[in-house]
Amino acid sequence: MFFSTNLFSAADMGYTKDTYQGLSWLGSFRAVTRLGAFVRTAILARLLVPSQFGLFGIASLVLAFLETITESGINIFLIQEEKKMADYINTAWVVSIVRGIVITLIIILSSPFIEKFFNAEGAFPLILMIALVAFIRGFINPARVQFLKNLEFKKEVLFSFAIFIIDSTVAIVTALLLRSPISLVYGLIAGAILEVILSMIFIDPKPKFIFEIGKFKEVVGRGKWVTGGKIFNYFFEQGDDWVVGKLLDTASLGMYQVAYKIGILPITEISQVVNQVTFPIYSRFSNDKKRLRRAYIKTTLAVLLFSSTIGLLVYIFAFEIVLVVLGRNWISAVPVLKILAIFGAIRAVVVSSNALFNSVKKQKYITYYTFASLAGMAVFIIPFVANYGLIGAGYSVLIGMVCTVPVVIRPIIRILKNEKS
């Protein structure tokens, strides 16, 4: 890992150890799974064509959209809350189940209209099948979040790795047998089933079907900013996919989505790891602004160094990366991959501020900056894609991300200076 145990001062050695162990475990897990994801993508790219990836992309867009707009923010709430997690688990589980059922029904009822909207023949069965993923995920034990709350990063890694292996194995094996994009959905279903089983067997407390309206209002009241931020972030991250799928074709959508994953995952993975580890740690001394400021600055500088280095490498070797990972059928993705490498480097630094905002219960700032990114992209996305194709889509998301920089800097300064906000 590029982080050292000097992340905090000697006075914070207890948290330093937790941070280092967390970064080591989660960083190693992310590195292994990203390597596995590249191998998986390379195999599937040779078994499926870009248009088939595009069909799966349409189904996953619908699932992600509905999961986002129904997000309650319960995971963030449970990590922040100082009361016993068991007080909220039952209500959280009931809400999760109902949410999964609602999403499933909406997907089933809207599937023919979605296929028609994208003019994507063959998307209908994938959309129907992916509805099962939402239904199954609704039964996951919400107490799983305690791995992060209690800084038990080893357990989180082992849990996530098992799900990743099953998802990837099922997707690849079924793709070899069927040569169909439905194999990607089978992988998601298998991973969701395993997550439910493991969460019920190995994680305590076990939820019961008990609903308390007071607990529900408490969670929703604090989680509204999380929901708002996730909605804006969804439209920023997926809005370009909707436009590409609508204005171009499924082959272009598949090409763009795969380029997007390759361009930003090596960079943004590190910011996700940092957020997972530093959020519960920042939360423990959120009232000590001196320690918080020292920790945040050192962490951000490390993320900046890493993301800019990886972004530069992806930009320089974009052609070689596409050729080796995806094959010659995907060469046209090279120009947009270069743009997305720059986008990913900036995004990694911006997103690393989420842990700071969440730790001081200022989720509204995440909503503000994600709205800024969405607004910046929205101005350019349709004309750029209509005139410049995939390259236009890449430039529009890059512009949107640049728009977030001034919006995110000001509240960070105010928080670290302990000013009222």
Image: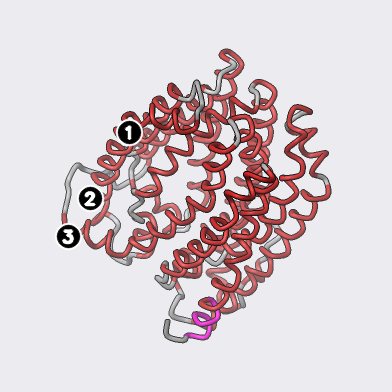
Local packing at callout 3 (Cα closer than 10 Å; few below 14, some 14-19, many 20+) is few
Left or right of 315? Residue 303 is left
The residue at which mark 1 appears reads as 104
| Circle nearer the N terminus (2, 1) | 2
Secondary structure of the residue carrying numbered label 2: helix
Image quadrant where residue 227 sits: bottom left
- The residue that label 2 is drawn on is 91
Q: What is the magenta range? A: 412-418
Alpha-carbon distance for marks 1 and 3? 26 Å
User: Mark 2 or mark 3, which is nearer the start of the sequence?
Assistant: 2
* Whole-percent x, y for residue 290 in the image: 54, 83
**Disc 2 residue crowd, few under 14, some 14–19, many 20+, Cα 10 Å:** many
Amino acid type, label 2: Thr
- Nearer to me, 199 or 134: 134
Question: Do labels 2 and 1 touch, CB within 8 Å?
Answer: no
Q: Residue at x 72, y 45 (%)?
A: 337
Q: Which residue carries the number 3 mark?
A: 214
As drawn, the label of residue 406 is none
Is residue 416 highlighted in magenta?
Answer: yes
Q: Tag 1's secondary structure?
A: helix
How much space separates mark 2 and mark 1, taking CA atoms? Answer: 20 Å
Front residue of this view, candidates 103 and 123: 123
Residue 258 drawn at (x, y percent): 64, 37
